[in-house]
């Protein structure tokens, strides 16, 4: 009887141990399955997060602000319009133009830049008549991650490069003046009396364009500068200054204006004075209205600075490459060579 009981206990223990072993195996399998499913879920989540990140990055708006010295001169208006048109082709570019009310208001330009510094825009495209005033805030913006390119000014590249300038697009203003000066010497055959209409007295462009004109005229002692006055780049001021010059100079062969606005103002003053046939007039910039004035015979020449090409190049050759992460492909200087436009070659520059 005792033996029978012992055998029953052994059998019960064996059955119990077998059952427990199966349970443990099942538990292990379940745990492994849960772990595998958890890993798969985490991997999927990481992939989805990466995809969302890439989508956000691709949709990021690239803020670009053009800051000309003002929108008084047709040159800067045409340049800004061309840049706006080029930027409109890219959905990711948020482009705007903010300018002082007048080219003499450098303090307004500084305040604009300070505001952009606070907003941390991606790119600033700037042209200024006073680099000493704007350079400190530009340096802060660059140190803060904003990329800065300048336009319409190339003479001070070595100085501006020191603050971290990314690029410069335009013409060398001294070369502008030299092209204008050369035309003066040729049309006057090296002899005559001229008046020079400057821009804002002492500003960047006045100094450099004036230097170019002087470089050429220094070799022609028989060409006399009888008047040299600022017209502040404005048509009305150019007309007013020319009226005063005409009253003071009964003999005058040519008026060399440092931009087309002043040249057109001078043309009106000369016409009003009845001296159109005796005085030749030149400007600088190659604006559409100046080209039309050459065709009409109101002015005789303008130095073409191709503002439309400058605006387009700022977007296509600078901003887009920055946006695409191709900074190394950006040229420090994109130089546009100025050329004199007269009746002889006007058809090469007129747009349909």
Image: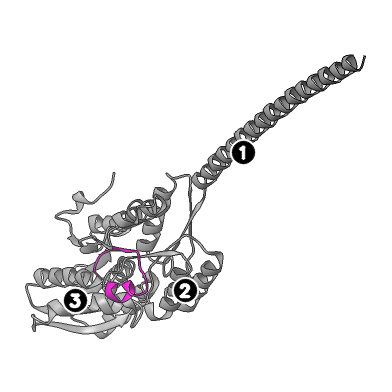
In reply to whether residue 349 is colored magenta, the answer given is no
Q: Which residue is mark 1?
A: 42
Mark 3 and mark 2 residues within 8 Å of each other at the beta carbon: no
Q: Quadrant of residue 261?
A: bottom left
In reply to whether residue 166 is colored magenta, the answer given is yes
> Could you tell me residue 50's position as x and y percent?
54, 42
- Residue 90 lies left or right of residue 295; in this view the side is right
* Segment tinted magenta in the rendering: 157-172
Query: Quick one: label 1 or label 3, which is nearer the N terminus?
Result: 1
Q: Which residue is mark 2?
A: 140
**Quadrant occupied by the N terminus:** top right
> Could you tell me residue 199's position as x and y percent?
33, 76
> Could you tell me residue 190's position as x and y percent?
7, 76
Query: Quick one: label 1 or label 2, which is nearer the N terminus?
Result: 1
Please identify, in this view, whether the residue under mark 1 or under mark 2 is nearer the observer. 1
Few, some or many residues within 10 Å of mark 1 (<14, 14–19, 20+): few
Q: Quadrant of residue 332?
A: bottom left
Q: Determine the residue positioned at 52% across, 74% down.
A: 111
Viewer-side residue, 351 vs 128: 128
Distance from disc 3 to disc 2, alpha carbons, whole Å, reads: 36 Å
Distance from disc 1 to disc 2, alpha carbons, whole Å, reads: 43 Å
- Residue 16 lies left or right of residue 36; in this view the side is right
- Please, is residue 215 above or below residue 313 in the view? below
Q: Determine the residue positioned at 39% across, 55% down.
A: 322
Please identify, in this view, whether the residue under mark 1 or under mark 3 is nearer the observer. 1
Distance from disc 1 to disc 3, alpha carbons, whole Å, reads: 72 Å
Query: Quick one: label 3 or label 2, which is nearer the N terminus?
Result: 2
- Please, is residue 38 above or below residue 308 in the view? above
| Secondary-structure class at tag 1 | helix
Q: Which residue is mark 3?
A: 213
């Amino acid at each position: 009887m005792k033996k029978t009981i012992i055998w029953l206990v052994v059998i019960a223990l064996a059955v119990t141990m077998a059952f427990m072993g199966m349970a443990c195996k099942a538990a292990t399998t379940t745990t492994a399955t849960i772990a595998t499913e958890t890993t798969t879920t985490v991997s999927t989540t990481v992939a989805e997060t990466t995809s969302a990140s890439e989508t956000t990055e691709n949709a990021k708006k690239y803020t670009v602000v053009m800051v000309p010295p003002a929108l008084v001169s047709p040159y800067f208006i045409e340049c800004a319009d061309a840049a706006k048109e080029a930027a409109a082709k890219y959905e990711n570019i948020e482009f705007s133009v903010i300018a002082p009310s007048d080219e003499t208001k450098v303090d307004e330009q500084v305040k604009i830049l300070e505001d952009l510094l606070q907003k941390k825009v991606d790119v600033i495209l700037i042209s200024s008549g006073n680099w000493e005033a704007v350079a400190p805030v530009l340096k802060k913006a660059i140190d803060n991650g904003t990329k800065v390119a300048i336009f319409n000014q190339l003479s001070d590249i070595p100085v501006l490069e020191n603050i971290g300038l990314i690029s410069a697009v335009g013409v060398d203003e001294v070369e502008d003046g030299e092209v204008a000066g050369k035309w003066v010497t040729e049309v006057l055959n090296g002899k005559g009396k001229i008046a020079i209409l400057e821009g804002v007295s002492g500003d960047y462009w006045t100094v450099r364009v004036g230097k170019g004109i002087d470089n050429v005229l220094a070799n022609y002692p028989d060409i006399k500068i009888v008047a040299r006055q600022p017209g502040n780049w404005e048509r009305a001021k150019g007309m007013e200054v020319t009226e005063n010059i005409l009253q003071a100079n009964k003999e005058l062969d040519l008026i060399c204006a440092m931009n087309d606005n002043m040249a057109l103002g001078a043309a009106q003053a000369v016409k009003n004075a009845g001296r159109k046939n005796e005085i030749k007039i030149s400007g600088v910039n190659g604006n559409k209205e100046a080209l039309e004035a050459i065709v009409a015979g109101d002015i005789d020449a303008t130095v073409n600075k191709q503002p439309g090409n400058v605006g387009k190049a700022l977007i296509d050759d600078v901003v887009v490459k920055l946006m695409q992460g191709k900074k190394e492909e950006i040229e420090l200087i994109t130089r546009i060579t100025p050329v004199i436009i007269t009746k002889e070659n006007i058809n090469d520059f007129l747009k349909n």
